[in-house]
Image (cartoon, rainbow, N blue to C red):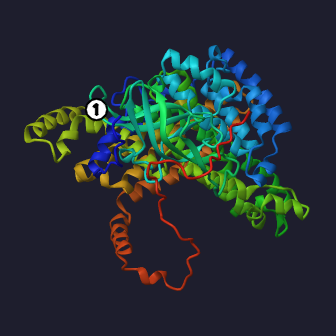
Amino acid sequence: MSAAPSKPTVTEREARQVAEAAREQEWRKPSFAKELFLGRFRLDLIHPHPLPADEDAQRGEEFLAKLRDFCETKVDGALIEREARIPDEVINGLKELGALGMKIDTKYGGLGLTQVYYNKALALAGSACPAIGVLLSAHQSIGVPQPLKLFGTAEQKEAFLPRCARTDISAFLLTEPDVGSDPARLATSAVPDGDDYVLDGVKLWTTNGVVADLLVVMARVPRSEGHKGGITAFVVETNSPGVTVENRNAFMGLRGIENGVTRFHQVRVPAANRIGPEGSGLKIALTTLNTGRLSLPASCVAAGKWCLKIAREWSVVREQWGKPIAHHEAVGSKISFIAATTFALEAVLDLSSQMADEDRNDIRIEGALAKLFASEMGWLIADELVQIRGGRGFETAESLAARGERAVPAEQVLRDLRINRIFEGSTEIMHLLIAREAVDAHLSVAGDLIDPEKSLPDKAKAGASAGVFYAKWLPKLVAGQGQLPYSYGEFKREVDLSAHLRYVERTARKLARSTFYAMSRWQGRMETKQGFLGRIVDIGAELFAMSAVCVRAELLRTTEDHGREAYQLADVFCRQSRIRVEELFGRLWTNTDDLDRKVVKGVLSGTYEWLEEGIVDPSGEGPWIADATPGPSERENVHRPIR
């Protein structure tokens, strides 16, 4: 057996190459969001709004009824928050209910729910206790079930999925103490040894890792004779010799989650437990996250609905200056934002989820936009609720109850939602990921033209291809249906949403023109303009959300009793969104990005160190990043399987 490789040292370019190799290269199915970034508003891809099959809906509703009863009678969210742990009997009750197998096919003992109903279940469970929502989603969205569903062999599915459906909790282990969104530096190794691989390394922030029975572990296989090598995915039994859960981490919010640090020392994993071929681990992870990310917006939808409920009830009861605070414009505007944005969050989630179920479209951008939009807007909604509640919003539910008032955990929701802007790709990483997909068509035809390492013949060939592409594409950005006053007339009712769809069409073309201009201006330096790219993506997210709310409002008009009210909420959201879009467009070219870079250099060089004087730093001693040198564990194993 060869020695485990040392931690890789990589350049920025090498890191980008690793990430590029892991992304799905081709577009085999249409994508509404991809077309939107190219200036093409393909309403036909999302309208009429897709719907679940009757059988799927019936099965989903039946489970939701059981889950609601369980959450109302067996889950004490205040207890979980106070003790920072989900009681074993609650987790066992979820197992008996089949909640561990919501997304697993019935032939493996699962419930076989659609993505739509899986998300509704996560929202329901998460409203009772956010930590429960995280437990269930980490297990099924990114844990063992999803990668096996997509990439596992028949034997692996037979071996592991029945366990995951009923008894075994799983976790996903990618992050390391010194490796976050830069997997090129992944240090955990998996060295081939006969029919096994031997794992060594340390994984950080392993959600469910403290209680998990099965782990999906990403590790680097060294290249050798007969082994392609590269980052590879494995299913690992947590009770294997050499696996130690060294710490149960504690956080600002989500206090009941079982998140830890896991060390592997000479852990033998059968080759039969490898998911996919060697070197495909990152691609498996990214593909899994395409739909796995939709579980996070589900928690944001639940939070938005709860915040709306509390804002409504509180703002009627609380009076200031002779009338309920809801009737004061300063508060009323916040309530309007909460209501309209919650409607938008649900519209984006349901549309993306139904598209995932139908599998007619490539939703890699839609899923990422849903995650980005929901995490940012969910946080703002919770922040506005705290503001509406005033001092009571800052006070804990336990303290409120102790002095005789309703125990409203507004501050807890704010704390719990904060991680969503970091979980499963931070907002900054999501901006870059989505931007890369959004400009894929441009890089496909002109990438060699702006690549400094390409030869002159390659650049000449790319220039010819780019000329053909842009000669056809650019003229289409000049005019479109958004300039015709009667376009999208089926959305014109008592409240007119057709004007908003025309705005989306016009603005999509403007967005595409802005992107093209930026690529022409900065060329190879485009990837360094992260502020610009982030604003481009945020505009796209708003346009996607506007499209989703209009389509959802029309669906509710034809199928529900709340069509008129849905149109009103969609109209308000679109008007609020358009203001944000115009501001973002203004900041594309009028901003402080260049000045910010100069200040950053000054901060890092110590130029402004004088500004830090006059304080006491309460931070404790210790390294910024914990040592993750491979070797045997010297700590107690805090792994706590639940039976």
Q: Image height check: is 337 above or below 61? A: below
Q: Position of residue 624 (x, y in %)?
A: 48, 64
Residue position marked by numbered label 1 in the rendering: 224
Q: Position of residue 401 (x, y in %)?
A: 87, 59
Q: Residue furthest right?
A: 404
Task: Give the crowd class for mark 1: few <14, some 14-19, many >=20 residues within 10 Å.
Answer: few
In which quarter of the view is residue 276 placed? top left
Q: Nearer the viewer, residue 633 or 179?
A: 633
The answer to whether one can see residue 74 in this image is yes
Q: Image height check: is 308 above or below 620? A: above
| Residue at disc 1, secondary structure | loop
For image coordinates 39% across by 30% down, the residue present is 193
> In which quadrant will I find the N terminus?
top left
The answer to whether one can see residue 485 in this image is no
- Tell me the amino acid under the disc marked 1: Ser
Q: Image height check: is 66 above or below 36? A: above
